[in-house]
Image (cartoon, rainbow, N blue to C red):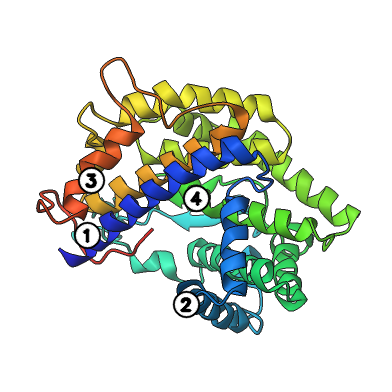
């Protein structure tokens, strides 16, 4: 299908970009951002200044979207109408996205699985899933608009969102995901809730970009650093974190993505390096077949989404390993499993040489 081909093709482009990235990082060694490549961002900024048609058009679209964010009032977790089991409205709360009330019982229990079909209840303002995604999206637009334009209004707006979500005692979220992806009548929370925080990377990037220009004062940075330390410790020791650490599919890759980045943010480089080294066997060896297929992702009803998303995160981890001297990109298991092979597996489908033979329900957005 067209959506599948477009998505897969975007990952071939991502592959080529990653190859360049890895080579340049070894040479340059100047990247200060954890989750983004500062060398590439700088090159894009130069092309915008030179009125390059492609990047100037994209930059214009970014500014339009970021400007819309200036009038949007931050929507913290304390605004939800459902109180978490803890009784603390500061705790993040969501329900399992693919679980639905049972149509055959009066009380809807037990909830049933409809893999790949999002329950509209998840998206209401009663819970936090939608507001979390909007916060991450807003910070991404505003931080990039500030980086490229250097217009302080975008930085100030991004700061106000971070202040609301992570600094202000009256509105900030607690540093845990104890009640993420719960299932009514069954689980208050599950390990799956952690994947909803994968894009906390945008918060880290925004803080790094703003802090480089002294947008935050010392007291604010102290509060932010404490929040991230507490979240990291929770994720490292809580049962949901441990289950993700020992898991076998995309949830575990996304767990590493968070943990490596936050460890680096906190200056815990040895812990980040150790986790990346472990990813060779814990992620590449267990998630990718010798032929490059990702069996656990291909078995889902949204196989394109999960195969491509998981591979993108694996590649991001490989890039994050470069400044720490860990080469995930070139790693090949004794039986031939590698990130490169996973890209080659997708290549013929992206190029249209073969038809995608696995299940993919619904529409598909590019990752």
Which mark is first along the chain, 3 or 4? 4
| Mark closer to the observer (1, 4) | 1
Q: Is residue 1 above or below residue 291?
A: below
Element carrying mark 2: helix
Q: Which residue is mark 3?
A: 346
Image quarter of the C terminus: bottom left
Looking at the image, is mark 3 or mark 1 nearer the viewer? 3
Nearer the viewer's eye, disc 2 or disc 4?
2
Q: Is residue 235 visible?
A: no
Q: Nearer the viewer, residue 27 or 219?
A: 27
Residue 329 as seen in the image, left or right of residue 266: left
3 and 1 marks in contact (CB < 8 Å)? no
Please, what secondary structure does the residue beneath circle 4 have?
Answer: strand
Kindly identify which residue carries mark 1. 4
Q: Are marks 1 and 2 in contact (CB under 8 Å)?
A: no
Q: Are marks 2 and 4 in contact (CB under 8 Å)?
A: no
Which is more N-terminal, label 4 or label 2? 2
State the image coordinates of residue 298 (x, y, percent, origin top left): 21, 43
Residue 7: x, y in percent? 29, 59
**Could you tell me how far apart the alpha carbons at marks 2 and 4 are, in whole angstroms?**
43 Å
């Amino acid at each position: 299908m067209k959506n599948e081909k477009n998505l897969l093709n975007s990952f071939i482009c991502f592959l080529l970009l990653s190859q360049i990235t890895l080579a340049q990082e070894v040479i340059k060694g100047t990247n200060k951002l954890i989750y983004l490549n500062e060398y590439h961002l700088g090159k894009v900024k130069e092309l915008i200044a030179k009125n390059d048609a492609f990047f100037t058009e994209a930059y214009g679209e970014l500014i339009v979207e970021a400007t819309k964010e200036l009038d949007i009032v931050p929507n913290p977790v304390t605004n939800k109408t459902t109180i978490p089991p803890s009784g603390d409205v500061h705790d993040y709360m969501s329900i399992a996205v693919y679980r639905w009330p049972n149509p055959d019982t009066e009380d809807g229990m037990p909830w049933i699985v409809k893999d790949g079909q999002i329950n509209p209840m998840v998206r209401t303002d009663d819970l936090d899933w939608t507001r979390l995604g909007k916060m991450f999206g807003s910070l991404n637009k505003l931080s990039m608009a500030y980086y490229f334009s250097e217009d302080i209004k975008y930085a100030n707006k991004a700061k106000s969102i971070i202040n609301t979500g992570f600094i202000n005692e009256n509105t900030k979220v607690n540093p845990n995901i104890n009640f993420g992806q719960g299932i009514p009548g069954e689980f208050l929370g599950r390990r799956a809730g952690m994947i909803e925080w994968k894009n906390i990377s945008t918060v880290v990037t925004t803080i790094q970009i703003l802090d480089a220009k002294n947008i935050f004062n010392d007291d604010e940075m102290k509060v932010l650093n404490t929040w991230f330390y507490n979240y990291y410790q929770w994720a490292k020791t809580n049962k949901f974190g441990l289950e993700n650490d020992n898991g076998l599919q995309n949830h575990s890759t996304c767990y590493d993505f968070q943990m490596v980045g936050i460890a680096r943010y906190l200056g815990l480089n040895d812990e980040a390096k150790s986790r990346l080294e472990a990813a060779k066997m814990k992620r590449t060896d267990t998630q990718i077949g010798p032929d490059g297929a990702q069996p656990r992702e291909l078995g889902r009803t949204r196989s394109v989404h999960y195969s491509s998303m998981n591979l993108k995160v694996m590649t991001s981890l490989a890039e994050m390993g470069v400044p720490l001297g860990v080469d995930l990109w070139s790693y090949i298991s004794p039986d031939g499993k590698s990130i490169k092979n996973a890209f080659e597996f997708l290549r013929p489908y992206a190029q249209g040489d073969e038809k995608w033979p696995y299940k993919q329900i619904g529409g598909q957005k590019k990752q």
